[in-house]
Image (tube, rainbow, N blue to C red):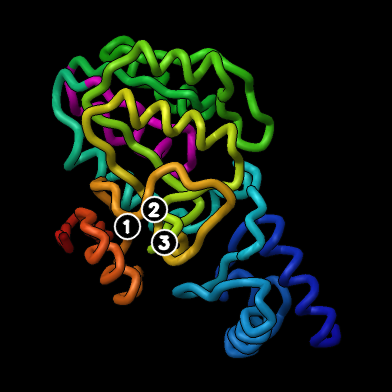
């Protein structure tokens, strides 16, 4: 395969899945990781992607399908989800879990609590929460089901949260940027997330490090809104500095369950 052909195929992969790792691309195309690093630098120089720790993400604002996102940054997402569940949930809480892959992973760490009420608009999130019945109460919103994210959105979903009051909401985003704040590529999703935020007393954002320093179409939380951000240990120092400068409470989740408070 010619280098130009490989670049085209790598860009197609990143566009379809939203991101990719150097190790995965090296194995798929049968070239060294050093070669993949050079390819990614070339694509970044051309403005198509942004390199991250161990991989790259696209910068075109496209929304990957849910199934594609499940395997991206999976270990980091697990660490972040576990940290959030262990540090920001208490017995008898009423919590909102949005339907993204990182937040959905929190379901595996909620069984130790008692008498939770958990509300979600995510179809896959509901499926994972089924194992907590009947110990906890699980509530699904109504609304229109999106085939890309398998989340319920629209006026019915937003109206539901207008009648609902939670202790805490757990959200993710396609990206965070020091000027754009937290953003997503679909305005139906961001409208529902704004409704979730209004119905909760406090907000916790779960973002793996590949999403820091990026932005998408529609902002749903301003950059300086006082929320807690949980990310992983591969976050770049410059991104952490920008988060702290914006007044956000930054927590870093590590593989062994330890924590670092960067606020």
Identify the residue position indicated by label 2 in the image: 207
Answer with left or right where residue 137 lies relative to residue 61.
left
Residue with the mark numbered 3: 179
In the image, is residue 44 above or below residue 161? below
**Image vertical order of residue 14 relative to residue 55, above or below:** above
- For image coordinates 70% across by 60% down, the residue present is 15
**Residue at point 35%, 32% (across, down):** 197
Residue 256's x, y, as percent?
22, 58
Residue 110 lies in the magenta-colored region: yes
Nearest the viewer among 191 and 142 is 191
User: CA separation, marks 1 and 3?
Assistant: 19 Å
Count of marks placed on residues? 3
Residue sitting at 25 percent across and 57 percent down?
A: 253
Q: Quadrant of the N terminus?
A: bottom right
Left-right relation of 171 to 124: left
Find residue 194 and report its horizontal and vertical position in percent. 42, 33
Bounds of the magenta segment? 94-114
Tell me the distance, in whole angstroms, between the alpha carbons under discs 1 and 2. Answer: 5 Å
Residue drawn at point x = 32 percent, y = 76 percent: 238
What is the secondary structure assignment of the residue under circle 2?
loop
Which residue position holds label 1?
231
Q: Are marks 1 and 2 in contact (CB under 8 Å)?
A: yes
Q: Can the viewer see residue 205 in this picture?
A: yes
Please give left or right for residue 88 compared with residue 25 in the image: left
Q: Position of residue 64 (x, y in %)?
A: 64, 49
Please rate how many residues cluster around mark 1, counting C-alpha atoms within 10 Å: few if below 14, some from 14 to 19, many from 20.
many
Query: Closer to the camera, 173 or 180?
Result: 180
Q: CA distance from mark 3 to mark 2?
A: 17 Å
- Which quadrant is the C terminus positioned in? bottom left
Q: Is residue 75 left or right of residue 258?
A: right
Query: For mark 3, does the 10 Å Cα neighbourhood hold few (<14), some (14 to 19), or many (20 or more) residues?
Result: few
Q: Earlier in the sequence, mark 3 or mark 2?
A: 3
């Amino acid at each position: 395969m010619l280098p130009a052909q490989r670049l085209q195929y790598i860009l197609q992969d990143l566009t379809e899945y939203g991101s990719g790792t150097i190790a995965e691309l090296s194995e798929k195309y049968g070239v060294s990781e050093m070669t993949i690093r050079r390819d990614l630098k070339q694509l970044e120089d051309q403005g198509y992607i942004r390199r991250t720790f161990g991989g790259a993400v696209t910068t075109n604002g496209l929304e990957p399908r849910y199934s594609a996102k499940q395997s991206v940054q999976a270990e980091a997402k697990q660490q972040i989800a576990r940290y959030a569940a262990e540090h920001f949930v208490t017995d008898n809480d009423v919590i909102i879990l949005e339907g993204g892959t990182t937040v959905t992973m929190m379901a595996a760490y909620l069984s130790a609590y008692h008498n939770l009420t958990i509300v979600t608009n995510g179809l896959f999130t509901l499926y994972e929460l089924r194992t907590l019945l009947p110990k906890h109460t699980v509530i699904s919103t109504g609304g229109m089901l999106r085939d890309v994210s398998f989340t319920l959105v629209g006026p019915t979903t937003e109206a539901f949260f207008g009648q609902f009051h939670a202790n805490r909401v757990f959200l993710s985003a396609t990206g965070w940027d020091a000027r754009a704040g937290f953003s997503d590529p679909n305005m139906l999703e961001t409208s529902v997330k704004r409704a979730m935020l209004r119905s909760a007393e406090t907000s916790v954002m779960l973002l793996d490090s590949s999403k820091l320093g990026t932005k998408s179409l529609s902002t749903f939380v301003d950059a300086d809104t006082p929320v807690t951000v949980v990310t992983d240990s591969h976050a770049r120092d410059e991104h952490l500095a920008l988060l702290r400068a914006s007044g956000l409470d930054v927590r870093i989740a590590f593989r062994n369950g330890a924590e670092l408070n960067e606020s």
